[in-house]
Amino acid sequence: MNTKLRLTVVAPSGILDKIRGNQLHSDISDLINNGTNIILIDMKDIKFIDSSGLGLLMSIMQMASKANVKFFICSINEQVRMLFELTKVNKFLQVFIDQDDCKRYILTNLYRVHHK
């Protein structure tokens, strides 16, 4: 493979609702169109996610998947973790403890496979 791994970290804050979720969706669409092939959403500053925000996260995951872009999430709080578990979203999303945890995964799994 000749393409480079291009990781972009996006760090939204506050409440992930329809308005912020739509903006996040738009931002990530732009990143994908500009060649980013690994997206990490760092949610350490997200205090709460409502149902529309959750739906938009799933939509972002599907958009990334269709574009063959790896999509990860890290640093979720307890409310978000419980929401992901209750809705079974955690079965579809790869969630890491923090950015370093995700980067270790990328280096040990994706980078090695990518450069064989």
Image (cartoon, rainbow, N blue to C red):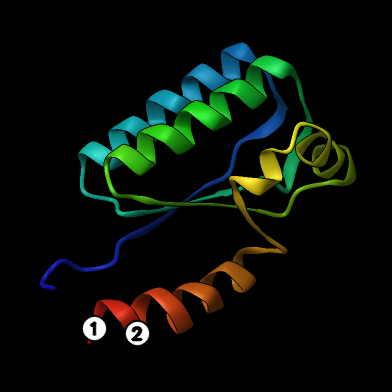
Residue occupying image coordinates x 46% and y 32%: 60
Q: Nearer the viewer, residue 86 or 42?
A: 86
Residue occupying image coordinates x 69% and y 46%: 90
Q: Going by the image, does 65 lie left or right of 94?
A: left
Vertical side of 13 occupied by 94: above or below: below
Vertical side of 22 occupied by 32: above or below: below
Residue 57: % across, % down: 56, 31
Q: Going by the image, does 30 lie left or right of 34?
A: right
Q: Distance from label 2 to label 1 (Cα)?
A: 5 Å
Q: Which residue is mark 1?
A: 115
Instruction: Check the picture and name the quadrant holding the N terminus.
Output: bottom left
Residue 82: % across, % down: 87, 40
Q: Quadrant of residue 16?
A: top right
Q: Nearer the viewer, residue 102 or 87?
A: 87
Q: How many marks?
A: 2
Callout 1: SS? loop
Residue 45: % across, % down: 73, 42
Residue occupying image coordinates x 29% and y 51%: 36
Q: Judge the density around disc 1: few (<14), some (14-19), many (≥20) Cα neighbours within 10 Å.
A: few
Numbered mark located on residue 25 in the image: none
- Type of amino acid at the residue the image marks with label 2: Arg
Q: Going by the image, does 12 lie left or right of 108?
A: right
Residue occupying image coordinates x 60% and y 36%: 12
Q: Which residue is mark 2?
A: 112
Q: Judge the density around disc 2: few (<14), some (14-19), many (≥20) Cα neighbours within 10 Å.
A: few
Instruction: Check the picture and name the quadrant holding the C terminus.
Output: bottom left
